[in-house]
Amino acid sequence: MSVLVVGSIALDTVKTPMAEHADLLGGSASYAAVSASFFSKVNLVGVVGDDFPKEHIEYFGSRGVDLAGLQQVPGKTFRWSGEYHWDLNTRDTRSVDLNVFEHFTPTLAPGYAQTPYVLLANIAPGLQHHVLDQMEKPRFVIADTMDLWINIAKPELISLLARVDMLILNDGEARQLTGLTSLIKAGRAIQAMGPRYVAVKKGEHGCLLFAPDGFFSCGAYPLEDIHDPTGAGDTFAGGLAGFLASQDNATVTFENLRQAVVYGSVMASFNVEAFSLERLRTLTQGEIAERYRLFKLMSQFEVISD
Ligand code: AMP
């Protein structure tokens, strides 16, 4: 089963307290598509300019990502720059240059409309709607978003929520969207806006999954060194979507989603170990399986009585 991923494909400049790197491969769709490709086939929908390095396109291809939906047009690729604070949990956006993104209309390549799983990675909600308008009865639709869209495109985002099965957002965004301080109340309030499932990410503190039939709290893998948190959320979403597609169940269940959240967390934990998508380049299936096993082990507990 395949996943259709639409989102940004970017050249990022990232500064952390330890290092700074310019013009790195980034963007929500880049992280999400590569992460999903470890589990399933991926159809990528996005746009790049004529300055986009050929080796990045070749890298997507080497991951088996279908590139028929990738438009390369005259102009400059979308650029984003961010600077992390000392705790690596918070960051300031230094610049955003939309460039070719400004006139981007995501058009599905032949055959893409039947893709069963859809990941609307972080991109303007209007474009997320436009992709959904072209899909033919997808089995499961996941949307990601960011604070910017809650600020400037809230009505489009709210109407999108009625069309998706799952929303992924971080704790600050969940509070911003609902005006509620309690994440539990916020998660439930977002479910009432449409998506049956809501995943609220809490950075290094893991993730909360709200389902109609339950609630799941997943920790984050305890890493000693984080080099670049950029794209952690997109890698999480990609791993989650890719895993769901690999299961190919007629209906996605709470049980599937709990496992998918853990696989998403595993993928995000690898991604932050290096800048850009560097860690994903060397990642193996064996490493994913081993970290999943450790994750499970760490989440188990038993009461020892004397
Ligand atoms: P994350 O760290 O999960 O928030 O994702 C960071 C990625 O999002 C970077 O690689 C950026 O290129 C991309 N990004 C930043 N701002 C935007 C935006 N307004 N629209 C789409 N993608 C963005």
Image (tube, rainbow, N blue to C red):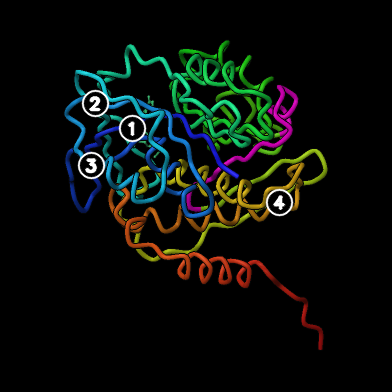
Residue at the farthest front position: 110
Mark 3 or mark 1: which comes first in sequence?
A: 1
Relative to 125, does residue 22 appear above or below in the rendering?
below
Mark 3 or mark 4: which comes first in sequence?
A: 3
Q: Nearer the viewer, mark 2 or mark 3?
A: 2
Residue type, label 2: Thr
Dot 3 falls on a residue whose secondary structure is strand
**Percent position (x, y) of residue 133?**
59, 16
Q: Which residues are magenta?
A: 188-204
Dot 1 falls on a residue whose secondary structure is loop
Q: Mark 2 and ligand 1: say if the CB distance to the nearest ligand atom is below 8 Å.
A: no
Residue type, label 4: Asn
Name the residue carrying label 2. Answer: 77
Q: Quadrant of residue 11?
A: top left
**Percent position (x, y) of residue 263?**
56, 56
Mark 2 or mark 4: which comes first in sequence?
A: 2
Instruction: Report the side of 153 relative to 85 (left or right).
Output: right
Based on the picture, tell me whether residue 301 belongs to the magenta stretch: no
* Residue at 35% over, 35% down: 27
Q: CA distance from mark 2 to mark 4?
A: 36 Å
- Could you tell me if the residues under marks 2 and 3 are in contact, i.e. CB atoms within 8 Å? no
Q: Nearer the viewer, mark 3 or mark 1?
A: 1
Name the residue carrying label 1. Answer: 9
Name the residue carrying label 4. Answer: 256
